[in-house]
Image (cartoon, helix red, strand yellow):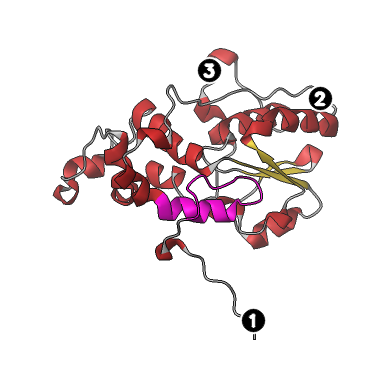
């Protein structure tokens, strides 16, 4: 389902951990159909409650063909690292996981994992916590596979330009707040080589999908498991 501001015929598809809290707040403040609560009653869930993040569905997106349609993408390594720093460390999604605590099947998982523990067991952590799964899914689930569906694709580094473009389109002064930022920074250099190999297949797919916007820092080494088959031409 698209996030829309119908008064201005704007449609946005949100990608978790790619500035979506900031963009949602900016759009909600523009939307005449939404009453912004008093500032002392606002938290991050105010904007996510108004504009939930949904997976991409082409037939639904096509309904907004006469809208100005955009999305925001983020460097795949930075996006994945922020799942740990924001959702695991800052919000405690793993520590608060009822399924992890109560099901002995997941007894091998540390409820307070180090970065290496978390990423080496990412598939299992996604299984025990829906929030981790949601934030660590591939970008195509939320944006689709064809960026030709958008009038403009912004990188998170270009949120200032997005604010300017929204201002021009709506005639209102738009600022882009910095919402839900992680309290700490994590990079690939902080991970053990074996951990990087564990997440390499996912990152390879992400960089292939986002190759028009970001360069893969993992080099030319490829894993058969992550290769996306090409369409056969007969």
**In the image, residue 115 lies at what x, y percent?**
32, 35
- Residue 3, compared with residue 32, is above or below; it is below
24 horizontally vs 193: left or right? right
Q: Can residue 32 be seen in this snapshot?
A: no
**Quadrant where the C terminus is found in the figure:** bottom right
Figure quadrant of residue 70:
top right
Do residues under tags 2 and 1 come within 8 Å of each other at their CB atoms? Answer: no
**In the image, residue 47 lies at what x, y percent?**
57, 31
25 horizontally vs 49: left or right? right
Magenta range is 200-220
**In the image, residue 134 lies at what x, y percent?**
44, 46
**In the image, residue 22 lies at what x, y percent?**
60, 29
Q: Residues within 10 Å of mark 2 (few under 14, many from 20)?
A: few
Residue visible at 78% across and 55% down in the picture: 65
User: Which of the two residues, 211 or 30, is positioned nearer the viewer here?
Assistant: 211
User: Which of the two residues, 224 or 155, is positioned nearer the viewer here?
Assistant: 224
Residue visible at 42% across and 23% down in the picture: 184
Do residues under tags 2 and 3 come within 8 Å of each other at their CB atoms? Answer: no
Q: Which residue is mark 1?
A: 233
- The CA span between labels 2 and 1 is 49 Å
Q: Which residue is mark 2?
A: 172
Q: Which residue is mark 3?
A: 41
Q: Which residue, as the protein is rendered here, is positioned at the far top?
A: 40
């Amino acid at each position: 389902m698209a996030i829309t501001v119908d008064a201005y015929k704007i449609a946005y598809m949100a990608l978790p951990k790619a500035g979506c809290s900031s963009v949602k707040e900016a759009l909600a403040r523009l939307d005449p159909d939404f009453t912004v609560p008093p500032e002392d009653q606002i938290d991050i869930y105010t904007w996510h409650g108004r504009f939930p993040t949904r997976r991409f569905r082409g037939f639904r997106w096509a309904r907004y063909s006469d809208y100005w349609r955009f999305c925001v993408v983020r460097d795949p390594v930075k996006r994945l690292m922020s799942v740990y720093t924001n959702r695991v460390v800052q919000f405690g999604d793993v520590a608060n996981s009822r399924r992890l605590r109560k099901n002995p099947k997941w007894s091998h998982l540390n409820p307070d994992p180090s970065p290496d523990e978390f990423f080496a067991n990412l598939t299992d952590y996604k299984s025990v916590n829906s929030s981790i799964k949601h934030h660590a899914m591939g970008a195509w689930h939320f944006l689709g596979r064809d960026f030709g569906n958008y009038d403009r694709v912004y990188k998170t580094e270009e949120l200032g330009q997005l604010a300017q473009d929204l201002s021009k389109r709506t005639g209102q002064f738009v600022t882009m707040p910095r919402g839900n930022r992680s309290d700490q920074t994590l990079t690939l250099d902080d991970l053990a080589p074996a951990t990087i190999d564990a997440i390499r297949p996912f990152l390879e797919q992400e960089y292939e999908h986002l190759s028009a916007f970001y360069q893969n820092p993992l080099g030319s080494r490829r894993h058969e498991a992550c290769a996306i088959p090409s369409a056969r031409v007969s």
